[in-house]
Image: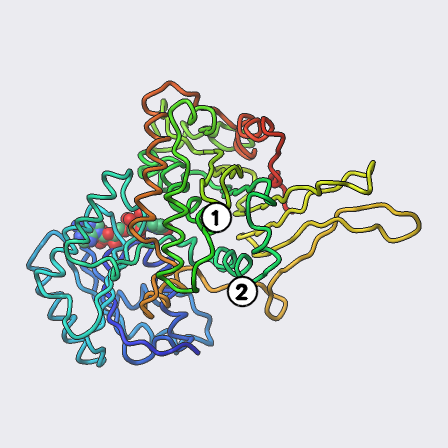
Amino acid sequence: MGTEQRALFIIFGGTGDLAKRKLYPSLFNLYRKGFLNENFAVIGTARRPWTDEYFQKVVTDAINSEDALAEDATQFASHFYYQSHNVNDTEHYITLRNLADKLDRKYEIGGNRMFYLAMSPRFFGTIAEHLKSQKIVTTEGYNRVIVEKPFGRDFASATELNDAIGRYFPEKDVFRIDHYLGKEMVQNILAVRFGNNLFRALWNNRYIDNIQITLSEALGVEERAGYYETAGALRDMVQNHILQIVALLTMNMPASYSEEDIRREKIYALKSLKKYTPAQVQANFIRAQYTAANGQRGYREEEKIASDSATETFVAGKLFVDNENFSGVPIYVRTGKRLSQKRSRIDIAFKTMPTNIFAPQPLGQNVLTINIEPEGKIFLQINVKQVGQGFTLKKSHLDFFPTSNGKQVFPEAYEKLFADALAGDATNFTHWEEVAYSWKFVDAIRTAWDQHDYALEEYPCGSMGPVAADKLLARDGHKWFYTGQEH
Ligand code: NAP
């Protein structure tokens, strides 16, 4: 059971998709695991005029509990209150403060407040300002604000957004969500790297040949078309999730497993990303759009998408982290929609032996694969002797596939991140400087694409992207280890 926490959650965007799909189920799991017990309450706010009863029904429906848990779910939902509220209306914050203070007393919360901004970032500044001016922030407990992605659409807008929040909340109280950091297998990167002398010793440019990161989605833009048209794969996936994974893979060893030390090294890794000139962007980054195939529509035929849209639904690139241990190691990344499978996977390819005593038999490369999803597993490709007479080498795997009672059940990323935020631990949230360096790197690519007539490639739905993404590696004598088939 977890350590019981006291907190009042105020969720802005309480009627929204994210709240229903992720936040309420995650809070329920924390309740069942004892992180939340009697001393908590949740205020959901949004404009529509819901009653508390209706809101509680939405919450129980959202957590979709099985019959055996129905009593738990009802008890849990009784801590939920709804406040109809337009975030631009100052009067509404006064009502919100009165309700918050009342619930604080009723549940003996001690002034701890968690403000979750699950709505469009354009409202973040005004919400932060009102929370302060209308004294919804307390003096006796903590006041933490959790903000959702996207955190800006470039460095300039992210800075503006950060300043708007930072005027009222210090950096230590701002928890920027990148839900990849809450994933079990992403958190395993540090365990593998810094818990095993074997890997610690080899984790550098003397032994690592190249790194590959693939975040592929089988779905298209679905109902997010409006947002996606203005974002594209580079902003939607590379600036945050992919660069966070790059930072975890290439950061130097922190002095301790602590928020301060880990974030410091991650910031340093992101600061060390090699910045590209426009010509280097053209040579090292590929953008593409999906076209109709396998009974699926092309991107330009999707609803709410312009028929001449130039938004990329796929990106592949080669990047470098120019720190002492990683300079010279190509890091190949790719992400896209309507690819053959949904999969998030990292491959770390080690250099082959400098001498091969088994020649002319070839030696396979040692490859460490961290599969993030759909299944979480780690496997290491090694060379072994084939059983029997003679001496023939073959490739084999050492596997780690964590299960419990034969099933793989990981806590939902949001559940882990909520628990961290309640404990005041921001290790798995992105620091402003990480966001800033990531945007600076991405802005250089975006600007080159916007200012030059670089190709927008095409790929058929159900493939693993355009041929150009394969050529990017072939040029260096490499190929993607993940080919779009289940491993
Ligand atoms: P959504 O379903 O459109 O929800 C937006 C929420 O904001 C609704 O509850 C809406 O309720 C409320 N709202 C809008 N204008 C308001 C106003 N003036 N005053 C008060 N409330 C207002 O969006 P979402 O998908 O939940 O996403 C929320 C945020 O999370 C976005 O920034 C999104 O980019 C981010 N995000 C979402 C997901 C996801 O899976 N959904 C994943 C990652 C990040 P009313 O209409 O009742 O006011």
Here the colouring is: rainbow
In front of the other: 129 or 463: 129
> Quick check: is the Cβ at mark 2 less than 8 Å away from ligand 1?
no
Give the crowd class for mark 1: few <14, some 14-19, many >=20 residues within 10 Å: many
In front of the other: 207 or 53: 207
Q: Is residue 327 left or right of residue 420?
A: right
**Kind of residue indicated by mark 2:** Val
Q: What count of labels does the image hold?
A: 2
Q: Residue 280: percent from the left, percent from the top?
A: 43, 26
What is the C-alpha distance between the residues marked 2 and 1? 28 Å
At horizontal 70% and vertical 53% (from top left) the residue drawn is 397
Residue that mark 2 sits on: 409
Residue that mark 1 sits on: 250
Labels 2 and 1: the sequence-earlier one: 1
Query: As drawn, which residue projects farthest toward the top?
Result: 453
> In front: mark 2 or mark 1?
1
**The N terminus lies in quadrant:** bottom left
Residue 349 appears in which quarter of the rendering? top right
Give the crowd class for mark 2: few <14, some 14-19, many >=20 residues within 10 Å: few
Taking 122 as reference, is 5 above or below it?
below
At horizontal 8% and vertical 62% (from top left) the residue drawn is 134
Query: As drawn, which residue projects farthest toward the left?
Result: 91
Q: Residue 16: percent from the left, percent from the top?
A: 29, 54
